[in-house]
Amino acid sequence: MASISRSIILQAVASAFLCTALAGPSTAQEGTPAKQLFGGVTLPSKTDPQPVGFYAKGCMSGAVALPTDGPTWQAMRLSRNRRWGNPQMIALLEQFSRDSTKLGWGSGILVGDISQPRGGPMLSGHSSHQIGLDADIWFTPKPDQPLSPQERESMPFTSMLDKSKFLTVDPKRWTTTHARVVMQAASYPQVERVFVNPAIKKKLCETWTGDRSLLGKVRPIYGHDEHFHIRIHCPAGASGCQKQAPVTAGDGCDKSLAWWFTKEPWAAPKPDPNKKPVKPRPVMLSDLPKACAAVLAAPARAEEEATFGGGAMAFTSQPASSAPARNIEAIINDPPVPTAEVPLPKPRPLQ
């Protein structure tokens, strides 16, 4: 027993607990927020890749990890264990990293959060990034000298905004290369949206002289002044993936952008004196697609095997077939495995 790693023990405990939970409602399942269940799992499921549900309400099976280091990228904040995604997302990031260097973006990209090993709600930081089709890219190029693990944890973000002014890009920090890198991300056909701060979107609207049709993919959103967020389409054949409504036609440099520069988006909500305060309810496993319980309960795949481009499993960027959905349903319909009552593993500590 001493030779078994702590992560494998946690996986076995979580799997046993959740197999019991699949048999029907239980106190643990009903009382434990989904973010703790998914945040406590350290390895992906040993199943075919499949996004399940919506970007902000779902999970993923068969995730692969972006290698922590590559010739044109480095993964940041490794303690979070959020470098997992659908193989098509990871393949895109590696391609984007190579293309960014050709634009003069240092020696590559710094990759922030993608998803947890099995997706799902996170313990902190995001409402999306749940199905392995979202990824954050720092507005800081990868330096020539590789960052150490400690530097990846402590290196501060750099905002592109002049914080002394309202929604204004800092001209000392923002460059034409920043603009080219963002628009390069938007150029890939599999990319559905690229989220940036409204001030950055406005700057692009005012200065971009390339293909204006790509600007429609660049969407303004709160935050996103220190990094930008790439979201890709549901892969072909991923029947369990819920698509997002397509972006509207045009470059997006219209009234929808002007709204962000009014008081309305930033005004505090007016309290209703006649409404009784309600404590926010956490998202539970039962709120997610049914298949997510099976994703949690599935056997784990070793990290080395699940790292993109290496290990015993050969991953490709080809569209997923319909087989994963059948695999998930088979797990759901299997009779529960008899297990002794076991405690729920504690979530990973926040770093």
Image (cartoon, rainbow, N blue to C red):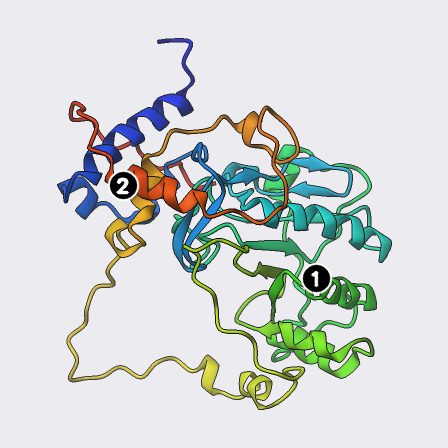
Q: Helix, strand or loop at disc 2?
A: helix
Which residue does the numbered mark 2 point to in the structure image? 332
Q: State the image quarter where residue 330 is shown.
A: top left
Could you tell me how far apart the alpha carbons at marks 2 and 1 are, in whole angstroms? 36 Å
Q: Is residue 107 visible?
A: yes
Of residues 89 and 222, the one drawn nearer to the viewer in this rendering: 89
In the figure, is residue 44 to the left or right of 66? left
Q: Position of residue 17 (x, y in %)?
A: 24, 32
Q: Position of residue 350 (x, y in %)?
A: 43, 41
Q: State the image quarter where residue 28 is shown.
A: top left
Q: Residue at x 43, y 18 (%)?
A: 5
Q: Earlier in the sequence, mark 2 or mark 1?
A: 1
Residue type at numbered disc 1: Tyr
Q: Residue at x 35, y 33 (%)?
A: 298
**Is 272 placed above or below 293 here?**
below
**Camera-nearest label, 2 or 1:** 2
Of residues 114 and 15, the one drawn nearer to the viewer in this rendering: 15
Q: Position of residue 268 (x, y in %)?
A: 38, 80
In the figure, is residue 315 to the left or right of 34? right
Q: Helix, strand or loop at disc 1?
A: loop
